[in-house]
């Protein structure tokens, strides 16, 4: 089985991402687009190179108060646009064949059919969709091909725990979503510290652990020491909830460890990773970070992937793509083949099957 462990469906922006407040959704979207590194910005009239500093204060990009009034909007063919002093700027953030900044369940399954991907798991981030109902509708449209993760507004856990827990139970028990994706990166937007393992989160985690579904964690830090601390936090959390299956999404932001020649992945970060825990897993997603930096088939990633296979083990590694963002530079087939066709010298056939889908199928209860 080929199972893409990291895919998205993107809700039409006119639906405000499922937020009750349209302004909140557009602020999330504008802040993300200001920092997204898929492609640089340019002046619309003549493609003169520009930057995204006009969208937010670059010194404090994760703060709603720094979002600038520049008529930020969705453009055509995967672009966003904004206007400063009468000049229009654009940024290509999704593939140019994508219309209205929308990627439906039908779009995803068509891509899967074309390259032979059997299943995909929908991940979550507020600027693509904050709505569990939207994701559940995508799953219901293709229940034999798509599974979906629930999400909660993490910034409300400290202030409205009961409301957040109601939404969590609805997503898992009523909407039948298949796990929870949790990220701490939005907490600073709401003036909160990003610690997700402290006592003010205990009641939330106690309730979640009783639901019996996997946890997909998107957490990180700034620089090597921050990444070490993030791995140590995952380890502490897993000691408290040892029965919960945990997947660290993305692995790491491999751009941060790359120069123009190779990837320098610090050993201290790997050693801080709780990979010896039987329920820990890591996603393998080199292409989404390195597709812009290195040419296909990204040979620079092979020594690092070999380290992960040798240390973490092939039974704990999960392939994913970040589709449709992962199609900006590579095709969907290339997102598979950079591993499948070029890493067979150190990943055997059975181990390759595990990495490309069988591990995900086991975690998500789809082994049959």
Image (cartoon, helix red, strand yellow):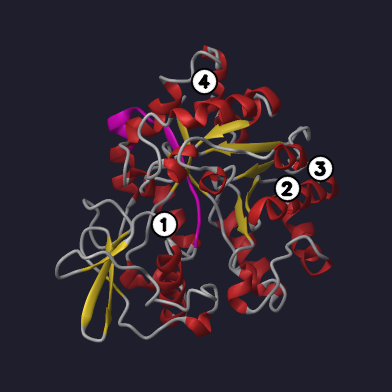
Point out which mark residue 353 bears.
Answer: 4
| Label 2 – label 3 distance at C-alpha | 15 Å
Front disc: 4 or 2: 2
| Camera-nearest label, 2 or 3 | 2
Q: Secondary structure at mark 2?
A: helix
Q: Which numbered mark, 1 or 3, is in the foreground of this view?
A: 1
Q: Is residue 172 left or right of residue 290?
A: right
- Cα separation between marks 1 and 3: 36 Å
Closer to the camera, 318 or 162? 318
* Image location of residue 309, percent across then percent down: 63, 25
Residue at 37% in and 45% down = 292
Res 242 label: 3
Compare marks 4 and 1 and give the one earlier in the sequence.
1
Residue 190 place in picture, x, y as percent:
61, 78
Of the 4 image quadrants, the one containing the C terminus is top right
Residue beneath disc 1: 37
Q: Give the camera-side residue of 112 and 297.
A: 297
Q: Earlier in the sequence, mark 1 or mark 2?
A: 1
Image height of 34 relative to 22, above or below: above
Residue at 78% across, 49% down: 232
Provide the residue span drawn in magenta. 112-125
| Circle nearer the viewer, 4 or 1 | 1
Task: Give above or below for 340 relative to 36.
Answer: above
Residue under numbered circle 2: 231
Q: CA distance from mark 1 to mark 2?
A: 24 Å
Q: Give percent across and percent down for residue 88.
A: 22, 76
């Amino acid at each position: 089985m080929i199972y893409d462990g990291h895919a998205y469906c993107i809700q039409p922006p006119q639906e405000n991402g499922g937020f009750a407040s349209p302004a909140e959704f557009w602020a999330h979207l504008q802040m993300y687009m200001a920092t997204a590194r898929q492609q640089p910005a340019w002046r619309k009239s003549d493609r003169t190179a520009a930057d995204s500093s006009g969208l937010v204060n670059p010194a404090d990009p994760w703060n709603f108060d720094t979002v600038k009034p520049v008529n930020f909007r969705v453009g055509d063919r995967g672009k966003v646009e904004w206007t400063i002093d009468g000049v229009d700027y654009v940024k290509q953030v999704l593939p140019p064949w994508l219309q209205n900044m929308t990627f439906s369940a039908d779009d995803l399954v068509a891509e899967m059919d074309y390259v032979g991907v059997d299943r995909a798991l929908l991940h979550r981030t507020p600027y693509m969709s904050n709505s569990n109902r939207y994701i559940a509708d995508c799953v219901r449209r293709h229940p034999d091909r798509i599974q979906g993760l629930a999400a909660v507004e993490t910034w409300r856990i400290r202030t409205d725990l009961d409301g957040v827990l109601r939404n969590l139970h609805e997503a898992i028990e009523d909407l039948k979503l298949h796990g929870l994706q949790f990220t701490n990166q939005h907490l600073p937007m709401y003036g909160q510290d990003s610690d997700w393992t402290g006592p003010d989160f205990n009641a939330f985690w106690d309730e979640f652990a009783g639901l019996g579904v996997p946890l997909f964690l998107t957490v990180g830090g700034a620089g090597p020491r921050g990444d070490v601390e993030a791995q140590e936090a995952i380890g502490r959390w897993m000691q408290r909830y040892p029965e919960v299956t945990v997947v660290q999404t993305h692995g790491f932001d491999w751009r941060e460890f790359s120069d123009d020649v190779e990837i320098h992945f610090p050993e201290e970060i790997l050693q801080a990773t709780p990979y010896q825990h039987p329920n820990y897993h890591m996603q393998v997603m080199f292409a989404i970070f390195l597709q812009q930096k290195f040419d296909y088939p990204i040979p620079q990633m092979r020594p690092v992937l070999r380290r992960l296979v040798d240390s973490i083990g092939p039974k704990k590694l999960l392939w994913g793509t970040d589709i449709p963002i992962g199609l900006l530079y590579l095709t969907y087939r290339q997102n598979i083949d950079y591993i499948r066709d070029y890493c067979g010298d150190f990943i055997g056939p059975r181990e390759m099957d595990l990495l490309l889908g069988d591990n995900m199928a086991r975690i998500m209860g789809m082994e049959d």
